Amino acid sequence: MSALLPDASTMAPRVDVLFWYMIGLCGFVAVGIFATMIYFGLKYRAGSKADRTGKHKQSMGVEATWTLVPFGMFLAVFIWSLFVFARLQSPPANAQTVYVVAKQWMWKIQHAGGQREIDALHVPLGQPIRLVMISQDVIHSFSVPAFRIKQDVLPSRYTNTWFTPTETGTFTLYCNQYCGLDHSKMIGDVVVMQPAAYARWLAKNPAPESVAARGAALFRSAGCSGCHGANASVHAPDLDGLYGRTVHLSGGGTVIADDRYIHDSILLPDQQVVAGFAPIMPSFEGQLSEQDILALVAYIKSTSATAHQPPSVGSESTHERH
Amino acid sequence: MNATVADSPLEEARRAHLEEQFDEPDQQHSAASLGMWIFLATEMLFFGVLFASYVVLRVLHPAGFAEASRETDLLLGSGETAALLTSSITIVVALRAIKLGQRGVATLFLSLTAALGIGFLVIHGFEYHSEWEEHLVPGVRFLKFGPHAHAVELFEVMSYLLTGWHSIHLIIAVSVVLGLTWRVWRGAFGPDHFTTLELAALYWHLVDIIWMFIFPLLYLIGRAPG
Amino acid sequence: MSAIDAGIVPQPKPESLAPSFYSGKRSLRGWLFTRDHKRIAILYTLSVTLFFLLGGAAAAMIRYDLIVPSGELPTEVYNKAFTFHGVVMVWFFLLPSIPVTLGNFLLPIMIGAKDLAFPRINLFSWYLFIGGGAFVVAALWAGGVDTGWTFYTPYSTMFSNTNVYLAIIGVFVTGFSTIFTGLNFIVTTHTMRTPGMTWMRLPLFVWGLYAVSVVMVLATPVLAMTLALVGLERVVGVGVFDPSLGGDPLLFQHLFWFYSHPAVYMMILPAMGLASEIISCFTSRRVFGYKFMTYSMLAIAVIGFMVWGHHMFVSGMSVYAAMVFSLLSFLVAVPSAIKIFNWTATLRKGDIRFTAPMLYALGFVGLFLLGGLTGLILAAPALDEFLHDTYFVIAHFHYVMVGGSVMCYLGGIHFWWPKVTGRMYSERLAKFAAVLMFVGFNVTFFPQYLLGYRGMPRRYHSYLPQFQELNVISTGGAVLLAISYTLPVLYLLWSLKYGKKAPPNPWDARGLEWQTSSPPPKENFLHPPVPREAYAYDKPAP
């Protein structure tokens, strides 16, 4: 149905098949019931000579049938939709990370290479893109209908979504969660380019430093290295290669060190303290912007020696805190 | 309208209190108590929101909640609990006395109930006062540093919401009981007419029971070893 | 009506000598301090109509703004208009409409009682309702609110600088009105039934009111407390929902939807019962599957409490939670499907009279069907991730709430108008209005399904040019809809003075309310009514 809306990502056709199947099913049921109502309406209008024997009869069998048949149908659709949903929630391993910071009323986007954009996102065709998103103020929602994706962007907590573009062109990005006065102006463009064109675009927009490099600089300038650095005298956990590892917490329990864990540890350090360490770290709230924290997360991630799977949104929920 | 013959003087007296929309005194009584039970259910849900928020925030900030919980005054808390528990007994005794027609006993035990309720509120006032002194009143007068400051403040928020909302209920309950004490003493109730008292007792029990949930959540859980 | 004129429909013994509830104290005092459920119902009817007009005016502003892509109104005005529309329509029209007007009037009569169990509380509920409404109107007066009716945090707590307090107080106060109404209805249904009126003889409208009352009593406190927390957060910054203080903004959404999804069922459950009354009467046969109809309403009320998470599939909730909520959302659709099938089957072998109330009721079934089916699409998280908070959702819930509840409410007004006022209205105009409403509604809201599929988000003051055609069609439909809502106001008022006098049972119906005079006397019945099986259309009227 590209006449109405392009199918511009790998997931779009999968979602669409389910959608049009449901529309077909619902349409069939609706037409069937309307037709039946009209037929009965004509046949049994007051004064007609239609046969009305057994007018007030009730039927248990009929009731059971139309309870169980829809139930079975709903269950089938539910299971199908779960499979699609599971895929929607699992980014491929080779996905490239792009950082998104939302604020009233703009999208601030930063590529791993350090290129920054506002209300625009350039991506190469066929490359899976994973978005790590956070809001500076209220709840926003990152929505690209052409890719069939949507994810709320929360303050103080990372959310993720991903897509693999399959069509070049410009697709609209909407803020989909009401966020105040200029909510309807908080739209942008996702520009999907041929890889060669994308390379040219990158070359034309050189970044002073990559996000991770900026994070490394911040790691020193903001004072993190004073405690967490190799030569620090303070007893603080070493952060080299932390990302993706399992961390044992004081008071029991473990957590996988993902974006959210690192973010929360910077802003609310007392929340999840590493076992064997005193809760002495001050909060950096108000001193670091969300973009700074994203850079620090990217830096800590870059120190992981070997490549590893980024934890998917699905696996994150295994330690969902509520 | 209704043809049932009032066969005893008691039945006749009950009929005198019948409101026009009802046919039978029993019907009126069961309507009133069912209404009260439903009202109590809604009250549980009012508190339910606060309990749910408490649980969510506690799961988010376990260490801070434990630390803050240890700063509560267990002695005063236990005293409050004892006062409320006792008051639930005294109000039942008063209700029983009214059903037996013992006006004096009922008046005595109702005043005792109100006194225990007031006692609870006074003790709680002391707790509020000492928290004010210790700068532990969230949003208004809160001064605390340290790694768990945020979480301690959230604990205090939940503590004030729970105890505050509970105290408002208790103040209402005490006022109702005081009013009823006066009316019992004046002889407004008797074996033929006690529904209002019964409803007040139900409400009083609810206020008591809710405290039985608040007390462990705020005072006890954080003290568990480990 | 020709049936009445021809004397085919037997009428109960003329009780016209009984003075109606309108006689007696006619002064304003007599109305404002009345404890008669029928008079309170009329006070409520006037109030909800007023709020409907206010909310409708806000809707007109929304549709006017969306005629051009850049928006005709200033952004601020638009944002306040849709907030006001939502707040007023949800809490001051849709939720109360059927229970407090028709329910209040009919519940005691249908079960053969003299009044509700707590007449004073009933009157007090009305004052609370008006008081809450006054706060919301004051919020508008003071400059409006711009948070959307959902009051999402942290926007409502930390960022909006509009009159959030006033709006919240208004909703909080009117919440108590809802709670007391629900409490009153439950107690009345339990304790006030006339001898012989067993549970399985209750009309389905009473069952609908009973189910909705349970939901009202159990859900509304949660909303009230949650909004109180939002208010406190604005005053002293308590931080329960504020992420920067360690709170959790999603907690607000969970609590809000724990109330607000059942609230949707509060709007539709009484409409379901009401439609059954009308359809049964104008097919002159028993409702098909009476027991299944009652059980399905109770099932909706119960399962409805467990599906709130489907409003939050894209909020960042865990995948497993999304699965559970999705499954339960599909499950809650089963009882709704049962009801649709049973209404259709009730038409079979009936003697169908296409009167105005019947047209409204059939329109309700059709629109509710379309709204319910698209709800299934949204229950699948994979599709919700695509359609959430687009116009598809807007169309879906308007089909259920406006196409469903409002159409049915008007059907009920037409059905019981002779009973309440003692007058007949112009049947021809009423039929015209019903058809126009069905057409106008579809022209207004069907294009919004397409807009949603094409990705237009809700609450947008301006939009991309490619959405203009559908928006213009939708606004055109809204004009038809506005006309079709105005017409009944006119001809019904006209009928009060010029309409023919209504007999006690103009439709040859079987409920107890048709055994008393039109309008009923203050005590509802001069002679104790004779309860029989519900919908005993196989026997002649008593």
Image: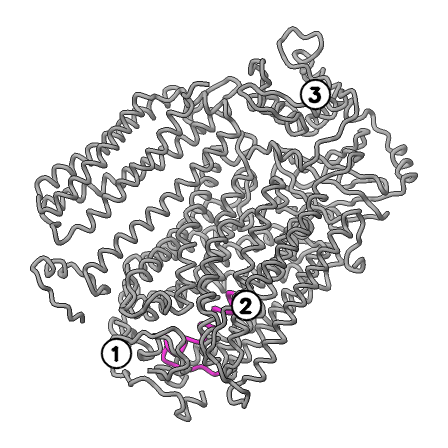
Q: Give the range drawn in magenta.
A: C405-427
| Residue under label 3 | A242
Q: What residue type is labelled 2?
A: Ile
Label for residue C340? 2
Q: Nearer the viewer, mark 2 or mark 3?
A: 2
Residue at screen point 72% across, 61% down: C468
Quadrant in the rendering for residue A154: top right
Q: Position of residue C161 (x, y in %)?
A: 54, 42
Classed neighbour count for the residue bearing mark 3: other residues with Cα under 10 Å, few (<14), some (14–19), many (≥20): many
User: Does B15 sit left or right of C110 as displayed?
Assistant: left
User: Quarter holding the N terminus of chain B?
Assistant: bottom left
User: Does A198 sit left or right of C243 as displayed?
Assistant: right
User: Does C534 sit left or right of A126 as displayed?
Assistant: left
| Residue under label 1 | C19
Q: Position of residue C9 (x, y in %)?
A: 39, 88
Residue C460 seen in this snapshot: no
Q: Which amino acid does label 3 sit on?
A: Leu
User: Does A21 sit left or right of C245 as displayed?
Assistant: right
The verdict on a common chain for dots 2 and 1 is yes
- Asked if disc 2 and disc 1 are in contact, CB closer than 8 Å, the reply is no
Dot 2: what SS?
A: helix
**Magenta region, main secondary structure:** helix
Q: Position of residue A113 (x, y in %)?
A: 82, 29
